[in-house]
Image: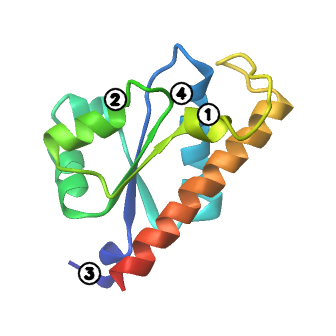
Amino acid sequence: MTEAQEKKVGIISCSGEERVEGTISRVATRLVLEKLRPNETVTICLPLFLAGGREEREFARDYPTITVDGCDKKCAKIATERYSGKPTSSILVTDILKNYQCPLSSRRKLNDATLTVTRKVAERIAEEVDEVLRHRR
């Protein structure tokens, strides 16, 4: 395992599209991957993971992994536990949303208020990444 690999944290995001919280989880994850912690994170595709993707399951088994679920079904967390082991950390978007009074928008097109909350979720994910990496040193 190279030093660069040792510093990577996997993020498995909700794939649910029927609720805006699923969209928030995916957009927040992309913000972390592309802007907040681009050198420290990788994403693991939940549908591929569920379909038996060997590399995805091995990464989640061998590296610290954070699951980000949109709702109480916790599909990402449960799948990770079933196929790779307990995730290092789990984030539930609906828990974060309880701290904000924000009218949620359409699940397909996020309005400004929902984008603001999405950034808060991304910041929470980034904090978890930092915490995971702090413990790996």
Residue with the mark numbered 3: 2
Q: Quadrant of the C terminus?
A: bottom left
Query: Which one is in front in this view, the residue at disc 3 or the one at disc 1?
Result: 1
Q: Mark 4 belongs to which amino acid?
A: Gly
SS at badge 3: loop
Q: Is the residue marked by circle 3 packed among few (<14), some (14-19), or many (20+) residues within 10 Å?
A: few
Please report contact status of discs 2 and 3: CB closer than 8 Å, yes or no. Answer: no
Q: Mark 2 belongs to which amino acid?
A: Cys
Which residue is pictured at 63% across the width and 62% down the height?
36
Please report contact status of discs 1 and 4: CB closer than 8 Å, yes or no. Answer: yes
Please report contact status of discs 4 and 3: CB closer than 8 Å, yes or no. Answer: no
Query: Which one is in front in this view, the residue at disc 4 or the one at disc 3?
Result: 4
Marks 2 and 1 sit apart, C-alpha to C-alpha, by 15 Å
**With respect to residue 22, does 96 lie above or below?**
below
Q: Mark 3 belongs to which amino acid?
A: Thr
N-terminal label among 2 and 3: 3
SS at badge 1: helix
Marks 2 and 3 sit apart, C-alpha to C-alpha, by 31 Å
**Horizontal and vertical percent for residue 47?**
31, 29
Residue with the mark numbered 2: 75
SS at badge 4: helix
Q: Is the residue marked by circle 2 packed among few (<14), some (14-19), or many (20+) residues within 10 Å?
A: many
N-terminal label among 4 and 2: 4
**With respect to residue 105, does 52 lie above or below?**
below
Residue with the mark numbered 1: 24
Marks 3 and 1 sit apart, C-alpha to C-alpha, by 33 Å
N-terminal label among 3 and 1: 3
